[in-house]
Amino acid sequence: MENVLTLGMLVFLQAVLGFDNLLYISLESKRVASEHRGMVRKVGIGLAIALRIVLLFAVIHAIEAFQAPFFAVHLPGVIEGDFNVHAAVVLAGGVFIVYTAFKEIAHLLSVHDIDGDAEEAPQRTPGVAIAWIVAMNIVFSFDSILSAMALTKVFWVMATAIVISGVMMMVLADRVADFLERNRMYEVLGLFILLVVGIMLLSEGGHIADLHLAGHPVEAMSKTTFYFSIAVMTVVDVAQGRYQKKLDAQRAG
């Protein structure tokens, strides 16, 4: 009974922590031809589930290797830190996501024909998009795996929670992607959420590495702060959208 209750808690935890991963998958799949997008999402998530279980097994049996520093920088007053595998992966993922978000935001602002631009030739092949989805899943996996290990040490419980949450992501990925496709005004909101995700990963990676910049420690952004920021951004975006519709209706009248 205890394992069943823990499994329920882990499935909920995986679903909450998987929100940012789901958003990235939905945005990444838009880079391929429309007829391949559903396949890319399903195959990418399927491979990510298998990889996450492998990573779970590896972390359980070699957690010290992930936490042991392999590189250090000590320039007092400039930059100081001790980097391990965990910190390096999280920091690399944060840099990539921030770069991707900024690039896509700049692209949206530079587009002249939005509908025409959406139909342009895809930027990536399905194989490359799947590879990026699987690679980024490694970044998002560390938090969920370490959080799961804090609740239980039973491998099958953690693995089952990963599979269940992965199936949920397969179902929701298409719906999230379809929603963004039908409501393109929320693309900017999605990209800024992705930007905040990248900043959160950078802060978390810096905290893990005990990074100090100009003598000041890098503090990890709390999950509460992250989700509160997302909630505020969403409410502001919805309110602004409705207000803009009222203004357009008054001007049209």
Image (cartoon, grey):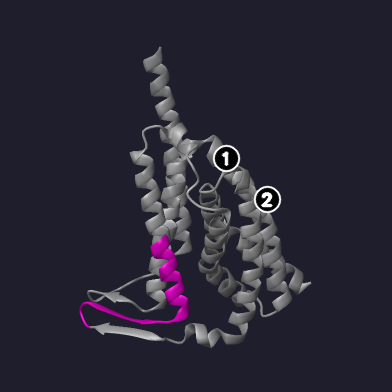
Residue 91 is left or right of residue 160, and the answer is left
Which is nearer the eye, 119 or 248? 119
Identify the mark nearer the N-term, 1 or 2. 2
Q: Which residue is mark 1?
A: 179
In percent of the image, x 37 and y 57: which residue is there? 99
Measuring from the top left, give residue 194's x and y in whole percent.
45, 54
Is residue 39 positioned above or below 78 on the image? above
Mark seen at residue 171: 2
Which contiguous range is marked in magenta?
A: 76-96
The image quadrant of residue 100 is bottom left
Q: Amino acid at mark 2?
A: Val
Can residue 10 be seen here? The reply is: no
Which is nearer the eye, 134 or 120? 120
Measuring from the top left, give residue 79's x and y in whole percent.
26, 77
In percent of the image, x 42 and y 69: which residue is there? 92
Contact between labelled residues 2 and 1, with CB atoms less than 8 Å apart: no
Q: Where is the N terminus found, in terms of image quarters?
A: bottom right
In percent of the image, x 43 and y 39: which residue is there? 237
